[in-house]
Every structure is written in structure tokens, then in C-alpha cells.
Amino acid sequence: MPGWGLSPKIPQPSYDDTQHMYIGRSRRIGRARSNGYTVNGGFTVMSRTDLLPDAGPVLSLRQALYRAGRDYKGGITTLAYDMVMDNDALQKKLKLDEERRWLSPDELEEVIRLTANPLLLDALMRPAGVVWYKPEPVPATKEALKAVGKLLAETGEFVSSMHAGAADSIWEPHEVATLDKHGVDVIRAVLGIMAGAREAMEGRDHG
């Protein structure tokens, strides 16, 4: 019957069989997959492609916040849930190219506490020129000491390879940042061994 047809002027929901998602212009009428897409604003599908696939070990604070959210178990969606925060709002605040929205101090504190992401902690401490250290005693065994020795040797080789910068005292920013990273890794490894040895000694004294 002619009256049974749908008017072309009415937005028709469509079904995307590939992503198992119903998409409408003004309202969501189905559910989106949690691991591939999100519904935002006017319910347009936004890709969650990793924007920092090969960023390296030294990140800016903005990059490190994004990485901390991406690497959190369950991703940014789960992080928002654990923060008791709107998912869409957190997505925007962690977006790399979104300059209009930033985490509040309380939100930043929550991201740091929940993720404990080393790259984020590095980015926070780097401007102050200090090193963060999380007390994680490592048993001062023969194997552990050998591992620290190997790390020291690898760091020494890296430093030796940077003789060009040392020769003319001209250091590029990326060279200094990478050198800082290696130095901090060594410091943490040694501090871990020290804490492990102290813990073993105190345990023996009180045993």
C-alpha cells in the first residue's frame, strides 16, 4: 500500500553490519562496539586509531596523557568509568590536537593515580629536572646484579656513541632527552637493588 512507505525526509537509521552498530542522525538506537568506535556529539562514528604508534620513549605531557589513557587496561573508556567521569568529556581532554579542553587538577591527579604510567611520570618530572622513583625492592641476587651491570654497560655504549655531541659541545634536544631517559633508567635500577638489599638486611636483623 502506498501509505506504508517511509518519507525520504525522515532521517532513516541505517545498520552497519561490519561494525554491528545502528546509526541515526539524532539518537542512537542500538549499541556500539566498545573496542572500535564511539558515539560522540551528533552520534558520528569516530575512529580510535592509535595516534602515537611509534612516538618513542620521550613524550611531551600532552602526548604522555594520551598514551596513559590509551595504555590503561580497557582504554580511555574504562579509565573514564574508574574516574566516574563522562567518557566523551575525557576523550576530548586527552585528545592530542584539542587545545580548548584540559584536565582539571583533580582530574589530572586521578589519571596519574590510576594509570601510574611511567611515560606520564617522566613527562611530569622532566621540566623540573628531577627523577621519580617508586619503591619496588628488587632482590639483590647475583642475577639481579648482573642485570644492572648489563644495563650500565648498554648505557655506557650509548653514551660513547654520542661522542659527536660531546666533541663540539653542541647537543640536540632529542639527544639530551634520550640521554636523560637512559640515565634515569639506570638510577631506578640501582635504587631498586639498594632497596632490595636493605629489605633483606632488615629482615635478617628482625628474624
Image (tube, rainbow, N blue to C red):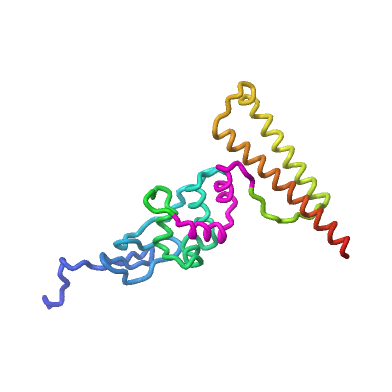
Q: Is residue 78 magenta?
A: no
Q: Eyeballing the image, is 114 above or below 122?
A: below
Q: Is residue 127 magenta?
A: yes
Q: Position of residue 76 (x, y in %)?
A: 47, 60
Q: Residue at x 81, y 54 (%)?
A: 198
Q: Residue at x 47, y 48 (%)?
A: 62
In the image, which residues are magenta? 103-131
Q: Quadrant of residue 87?
A: bottom left
Q: Position of residue 126 (x, y in %)?
A: 57, 43
Q: State the predominant SS element of the stretch in magenta.
A: helix
Query: Viewed as shown, does residue 96 lie left or right of 9?
Result: right
Q: Position of residue 149 (x, y in %)?
A: 77, 42
Q: Residue at x 69, y 37 (%)?
A: 155
Q: Eyeballing the image, is 201 above or below 10?
A: above
Quick one: 170 or 68, which is closer to the camera?
A: 170
Q: Eyeballing the image, is 170 above or below 157?
A: above
- Count of labels in the image: 0
Quick one: 35 or 58, which is closer to the camera?
A: 58
Q: Residue at x 34, y 59 (%)?
A: 45
Quick one: 4 or 21, which is closer to the camera?
A: 21
Q: Position of residue 23 (x, y in %)?
A: 31, 65
Q: Quadrant of the C terminus?
A: bottom right
Q: Eyeballing the image, is 137 above or below 26?
A: above
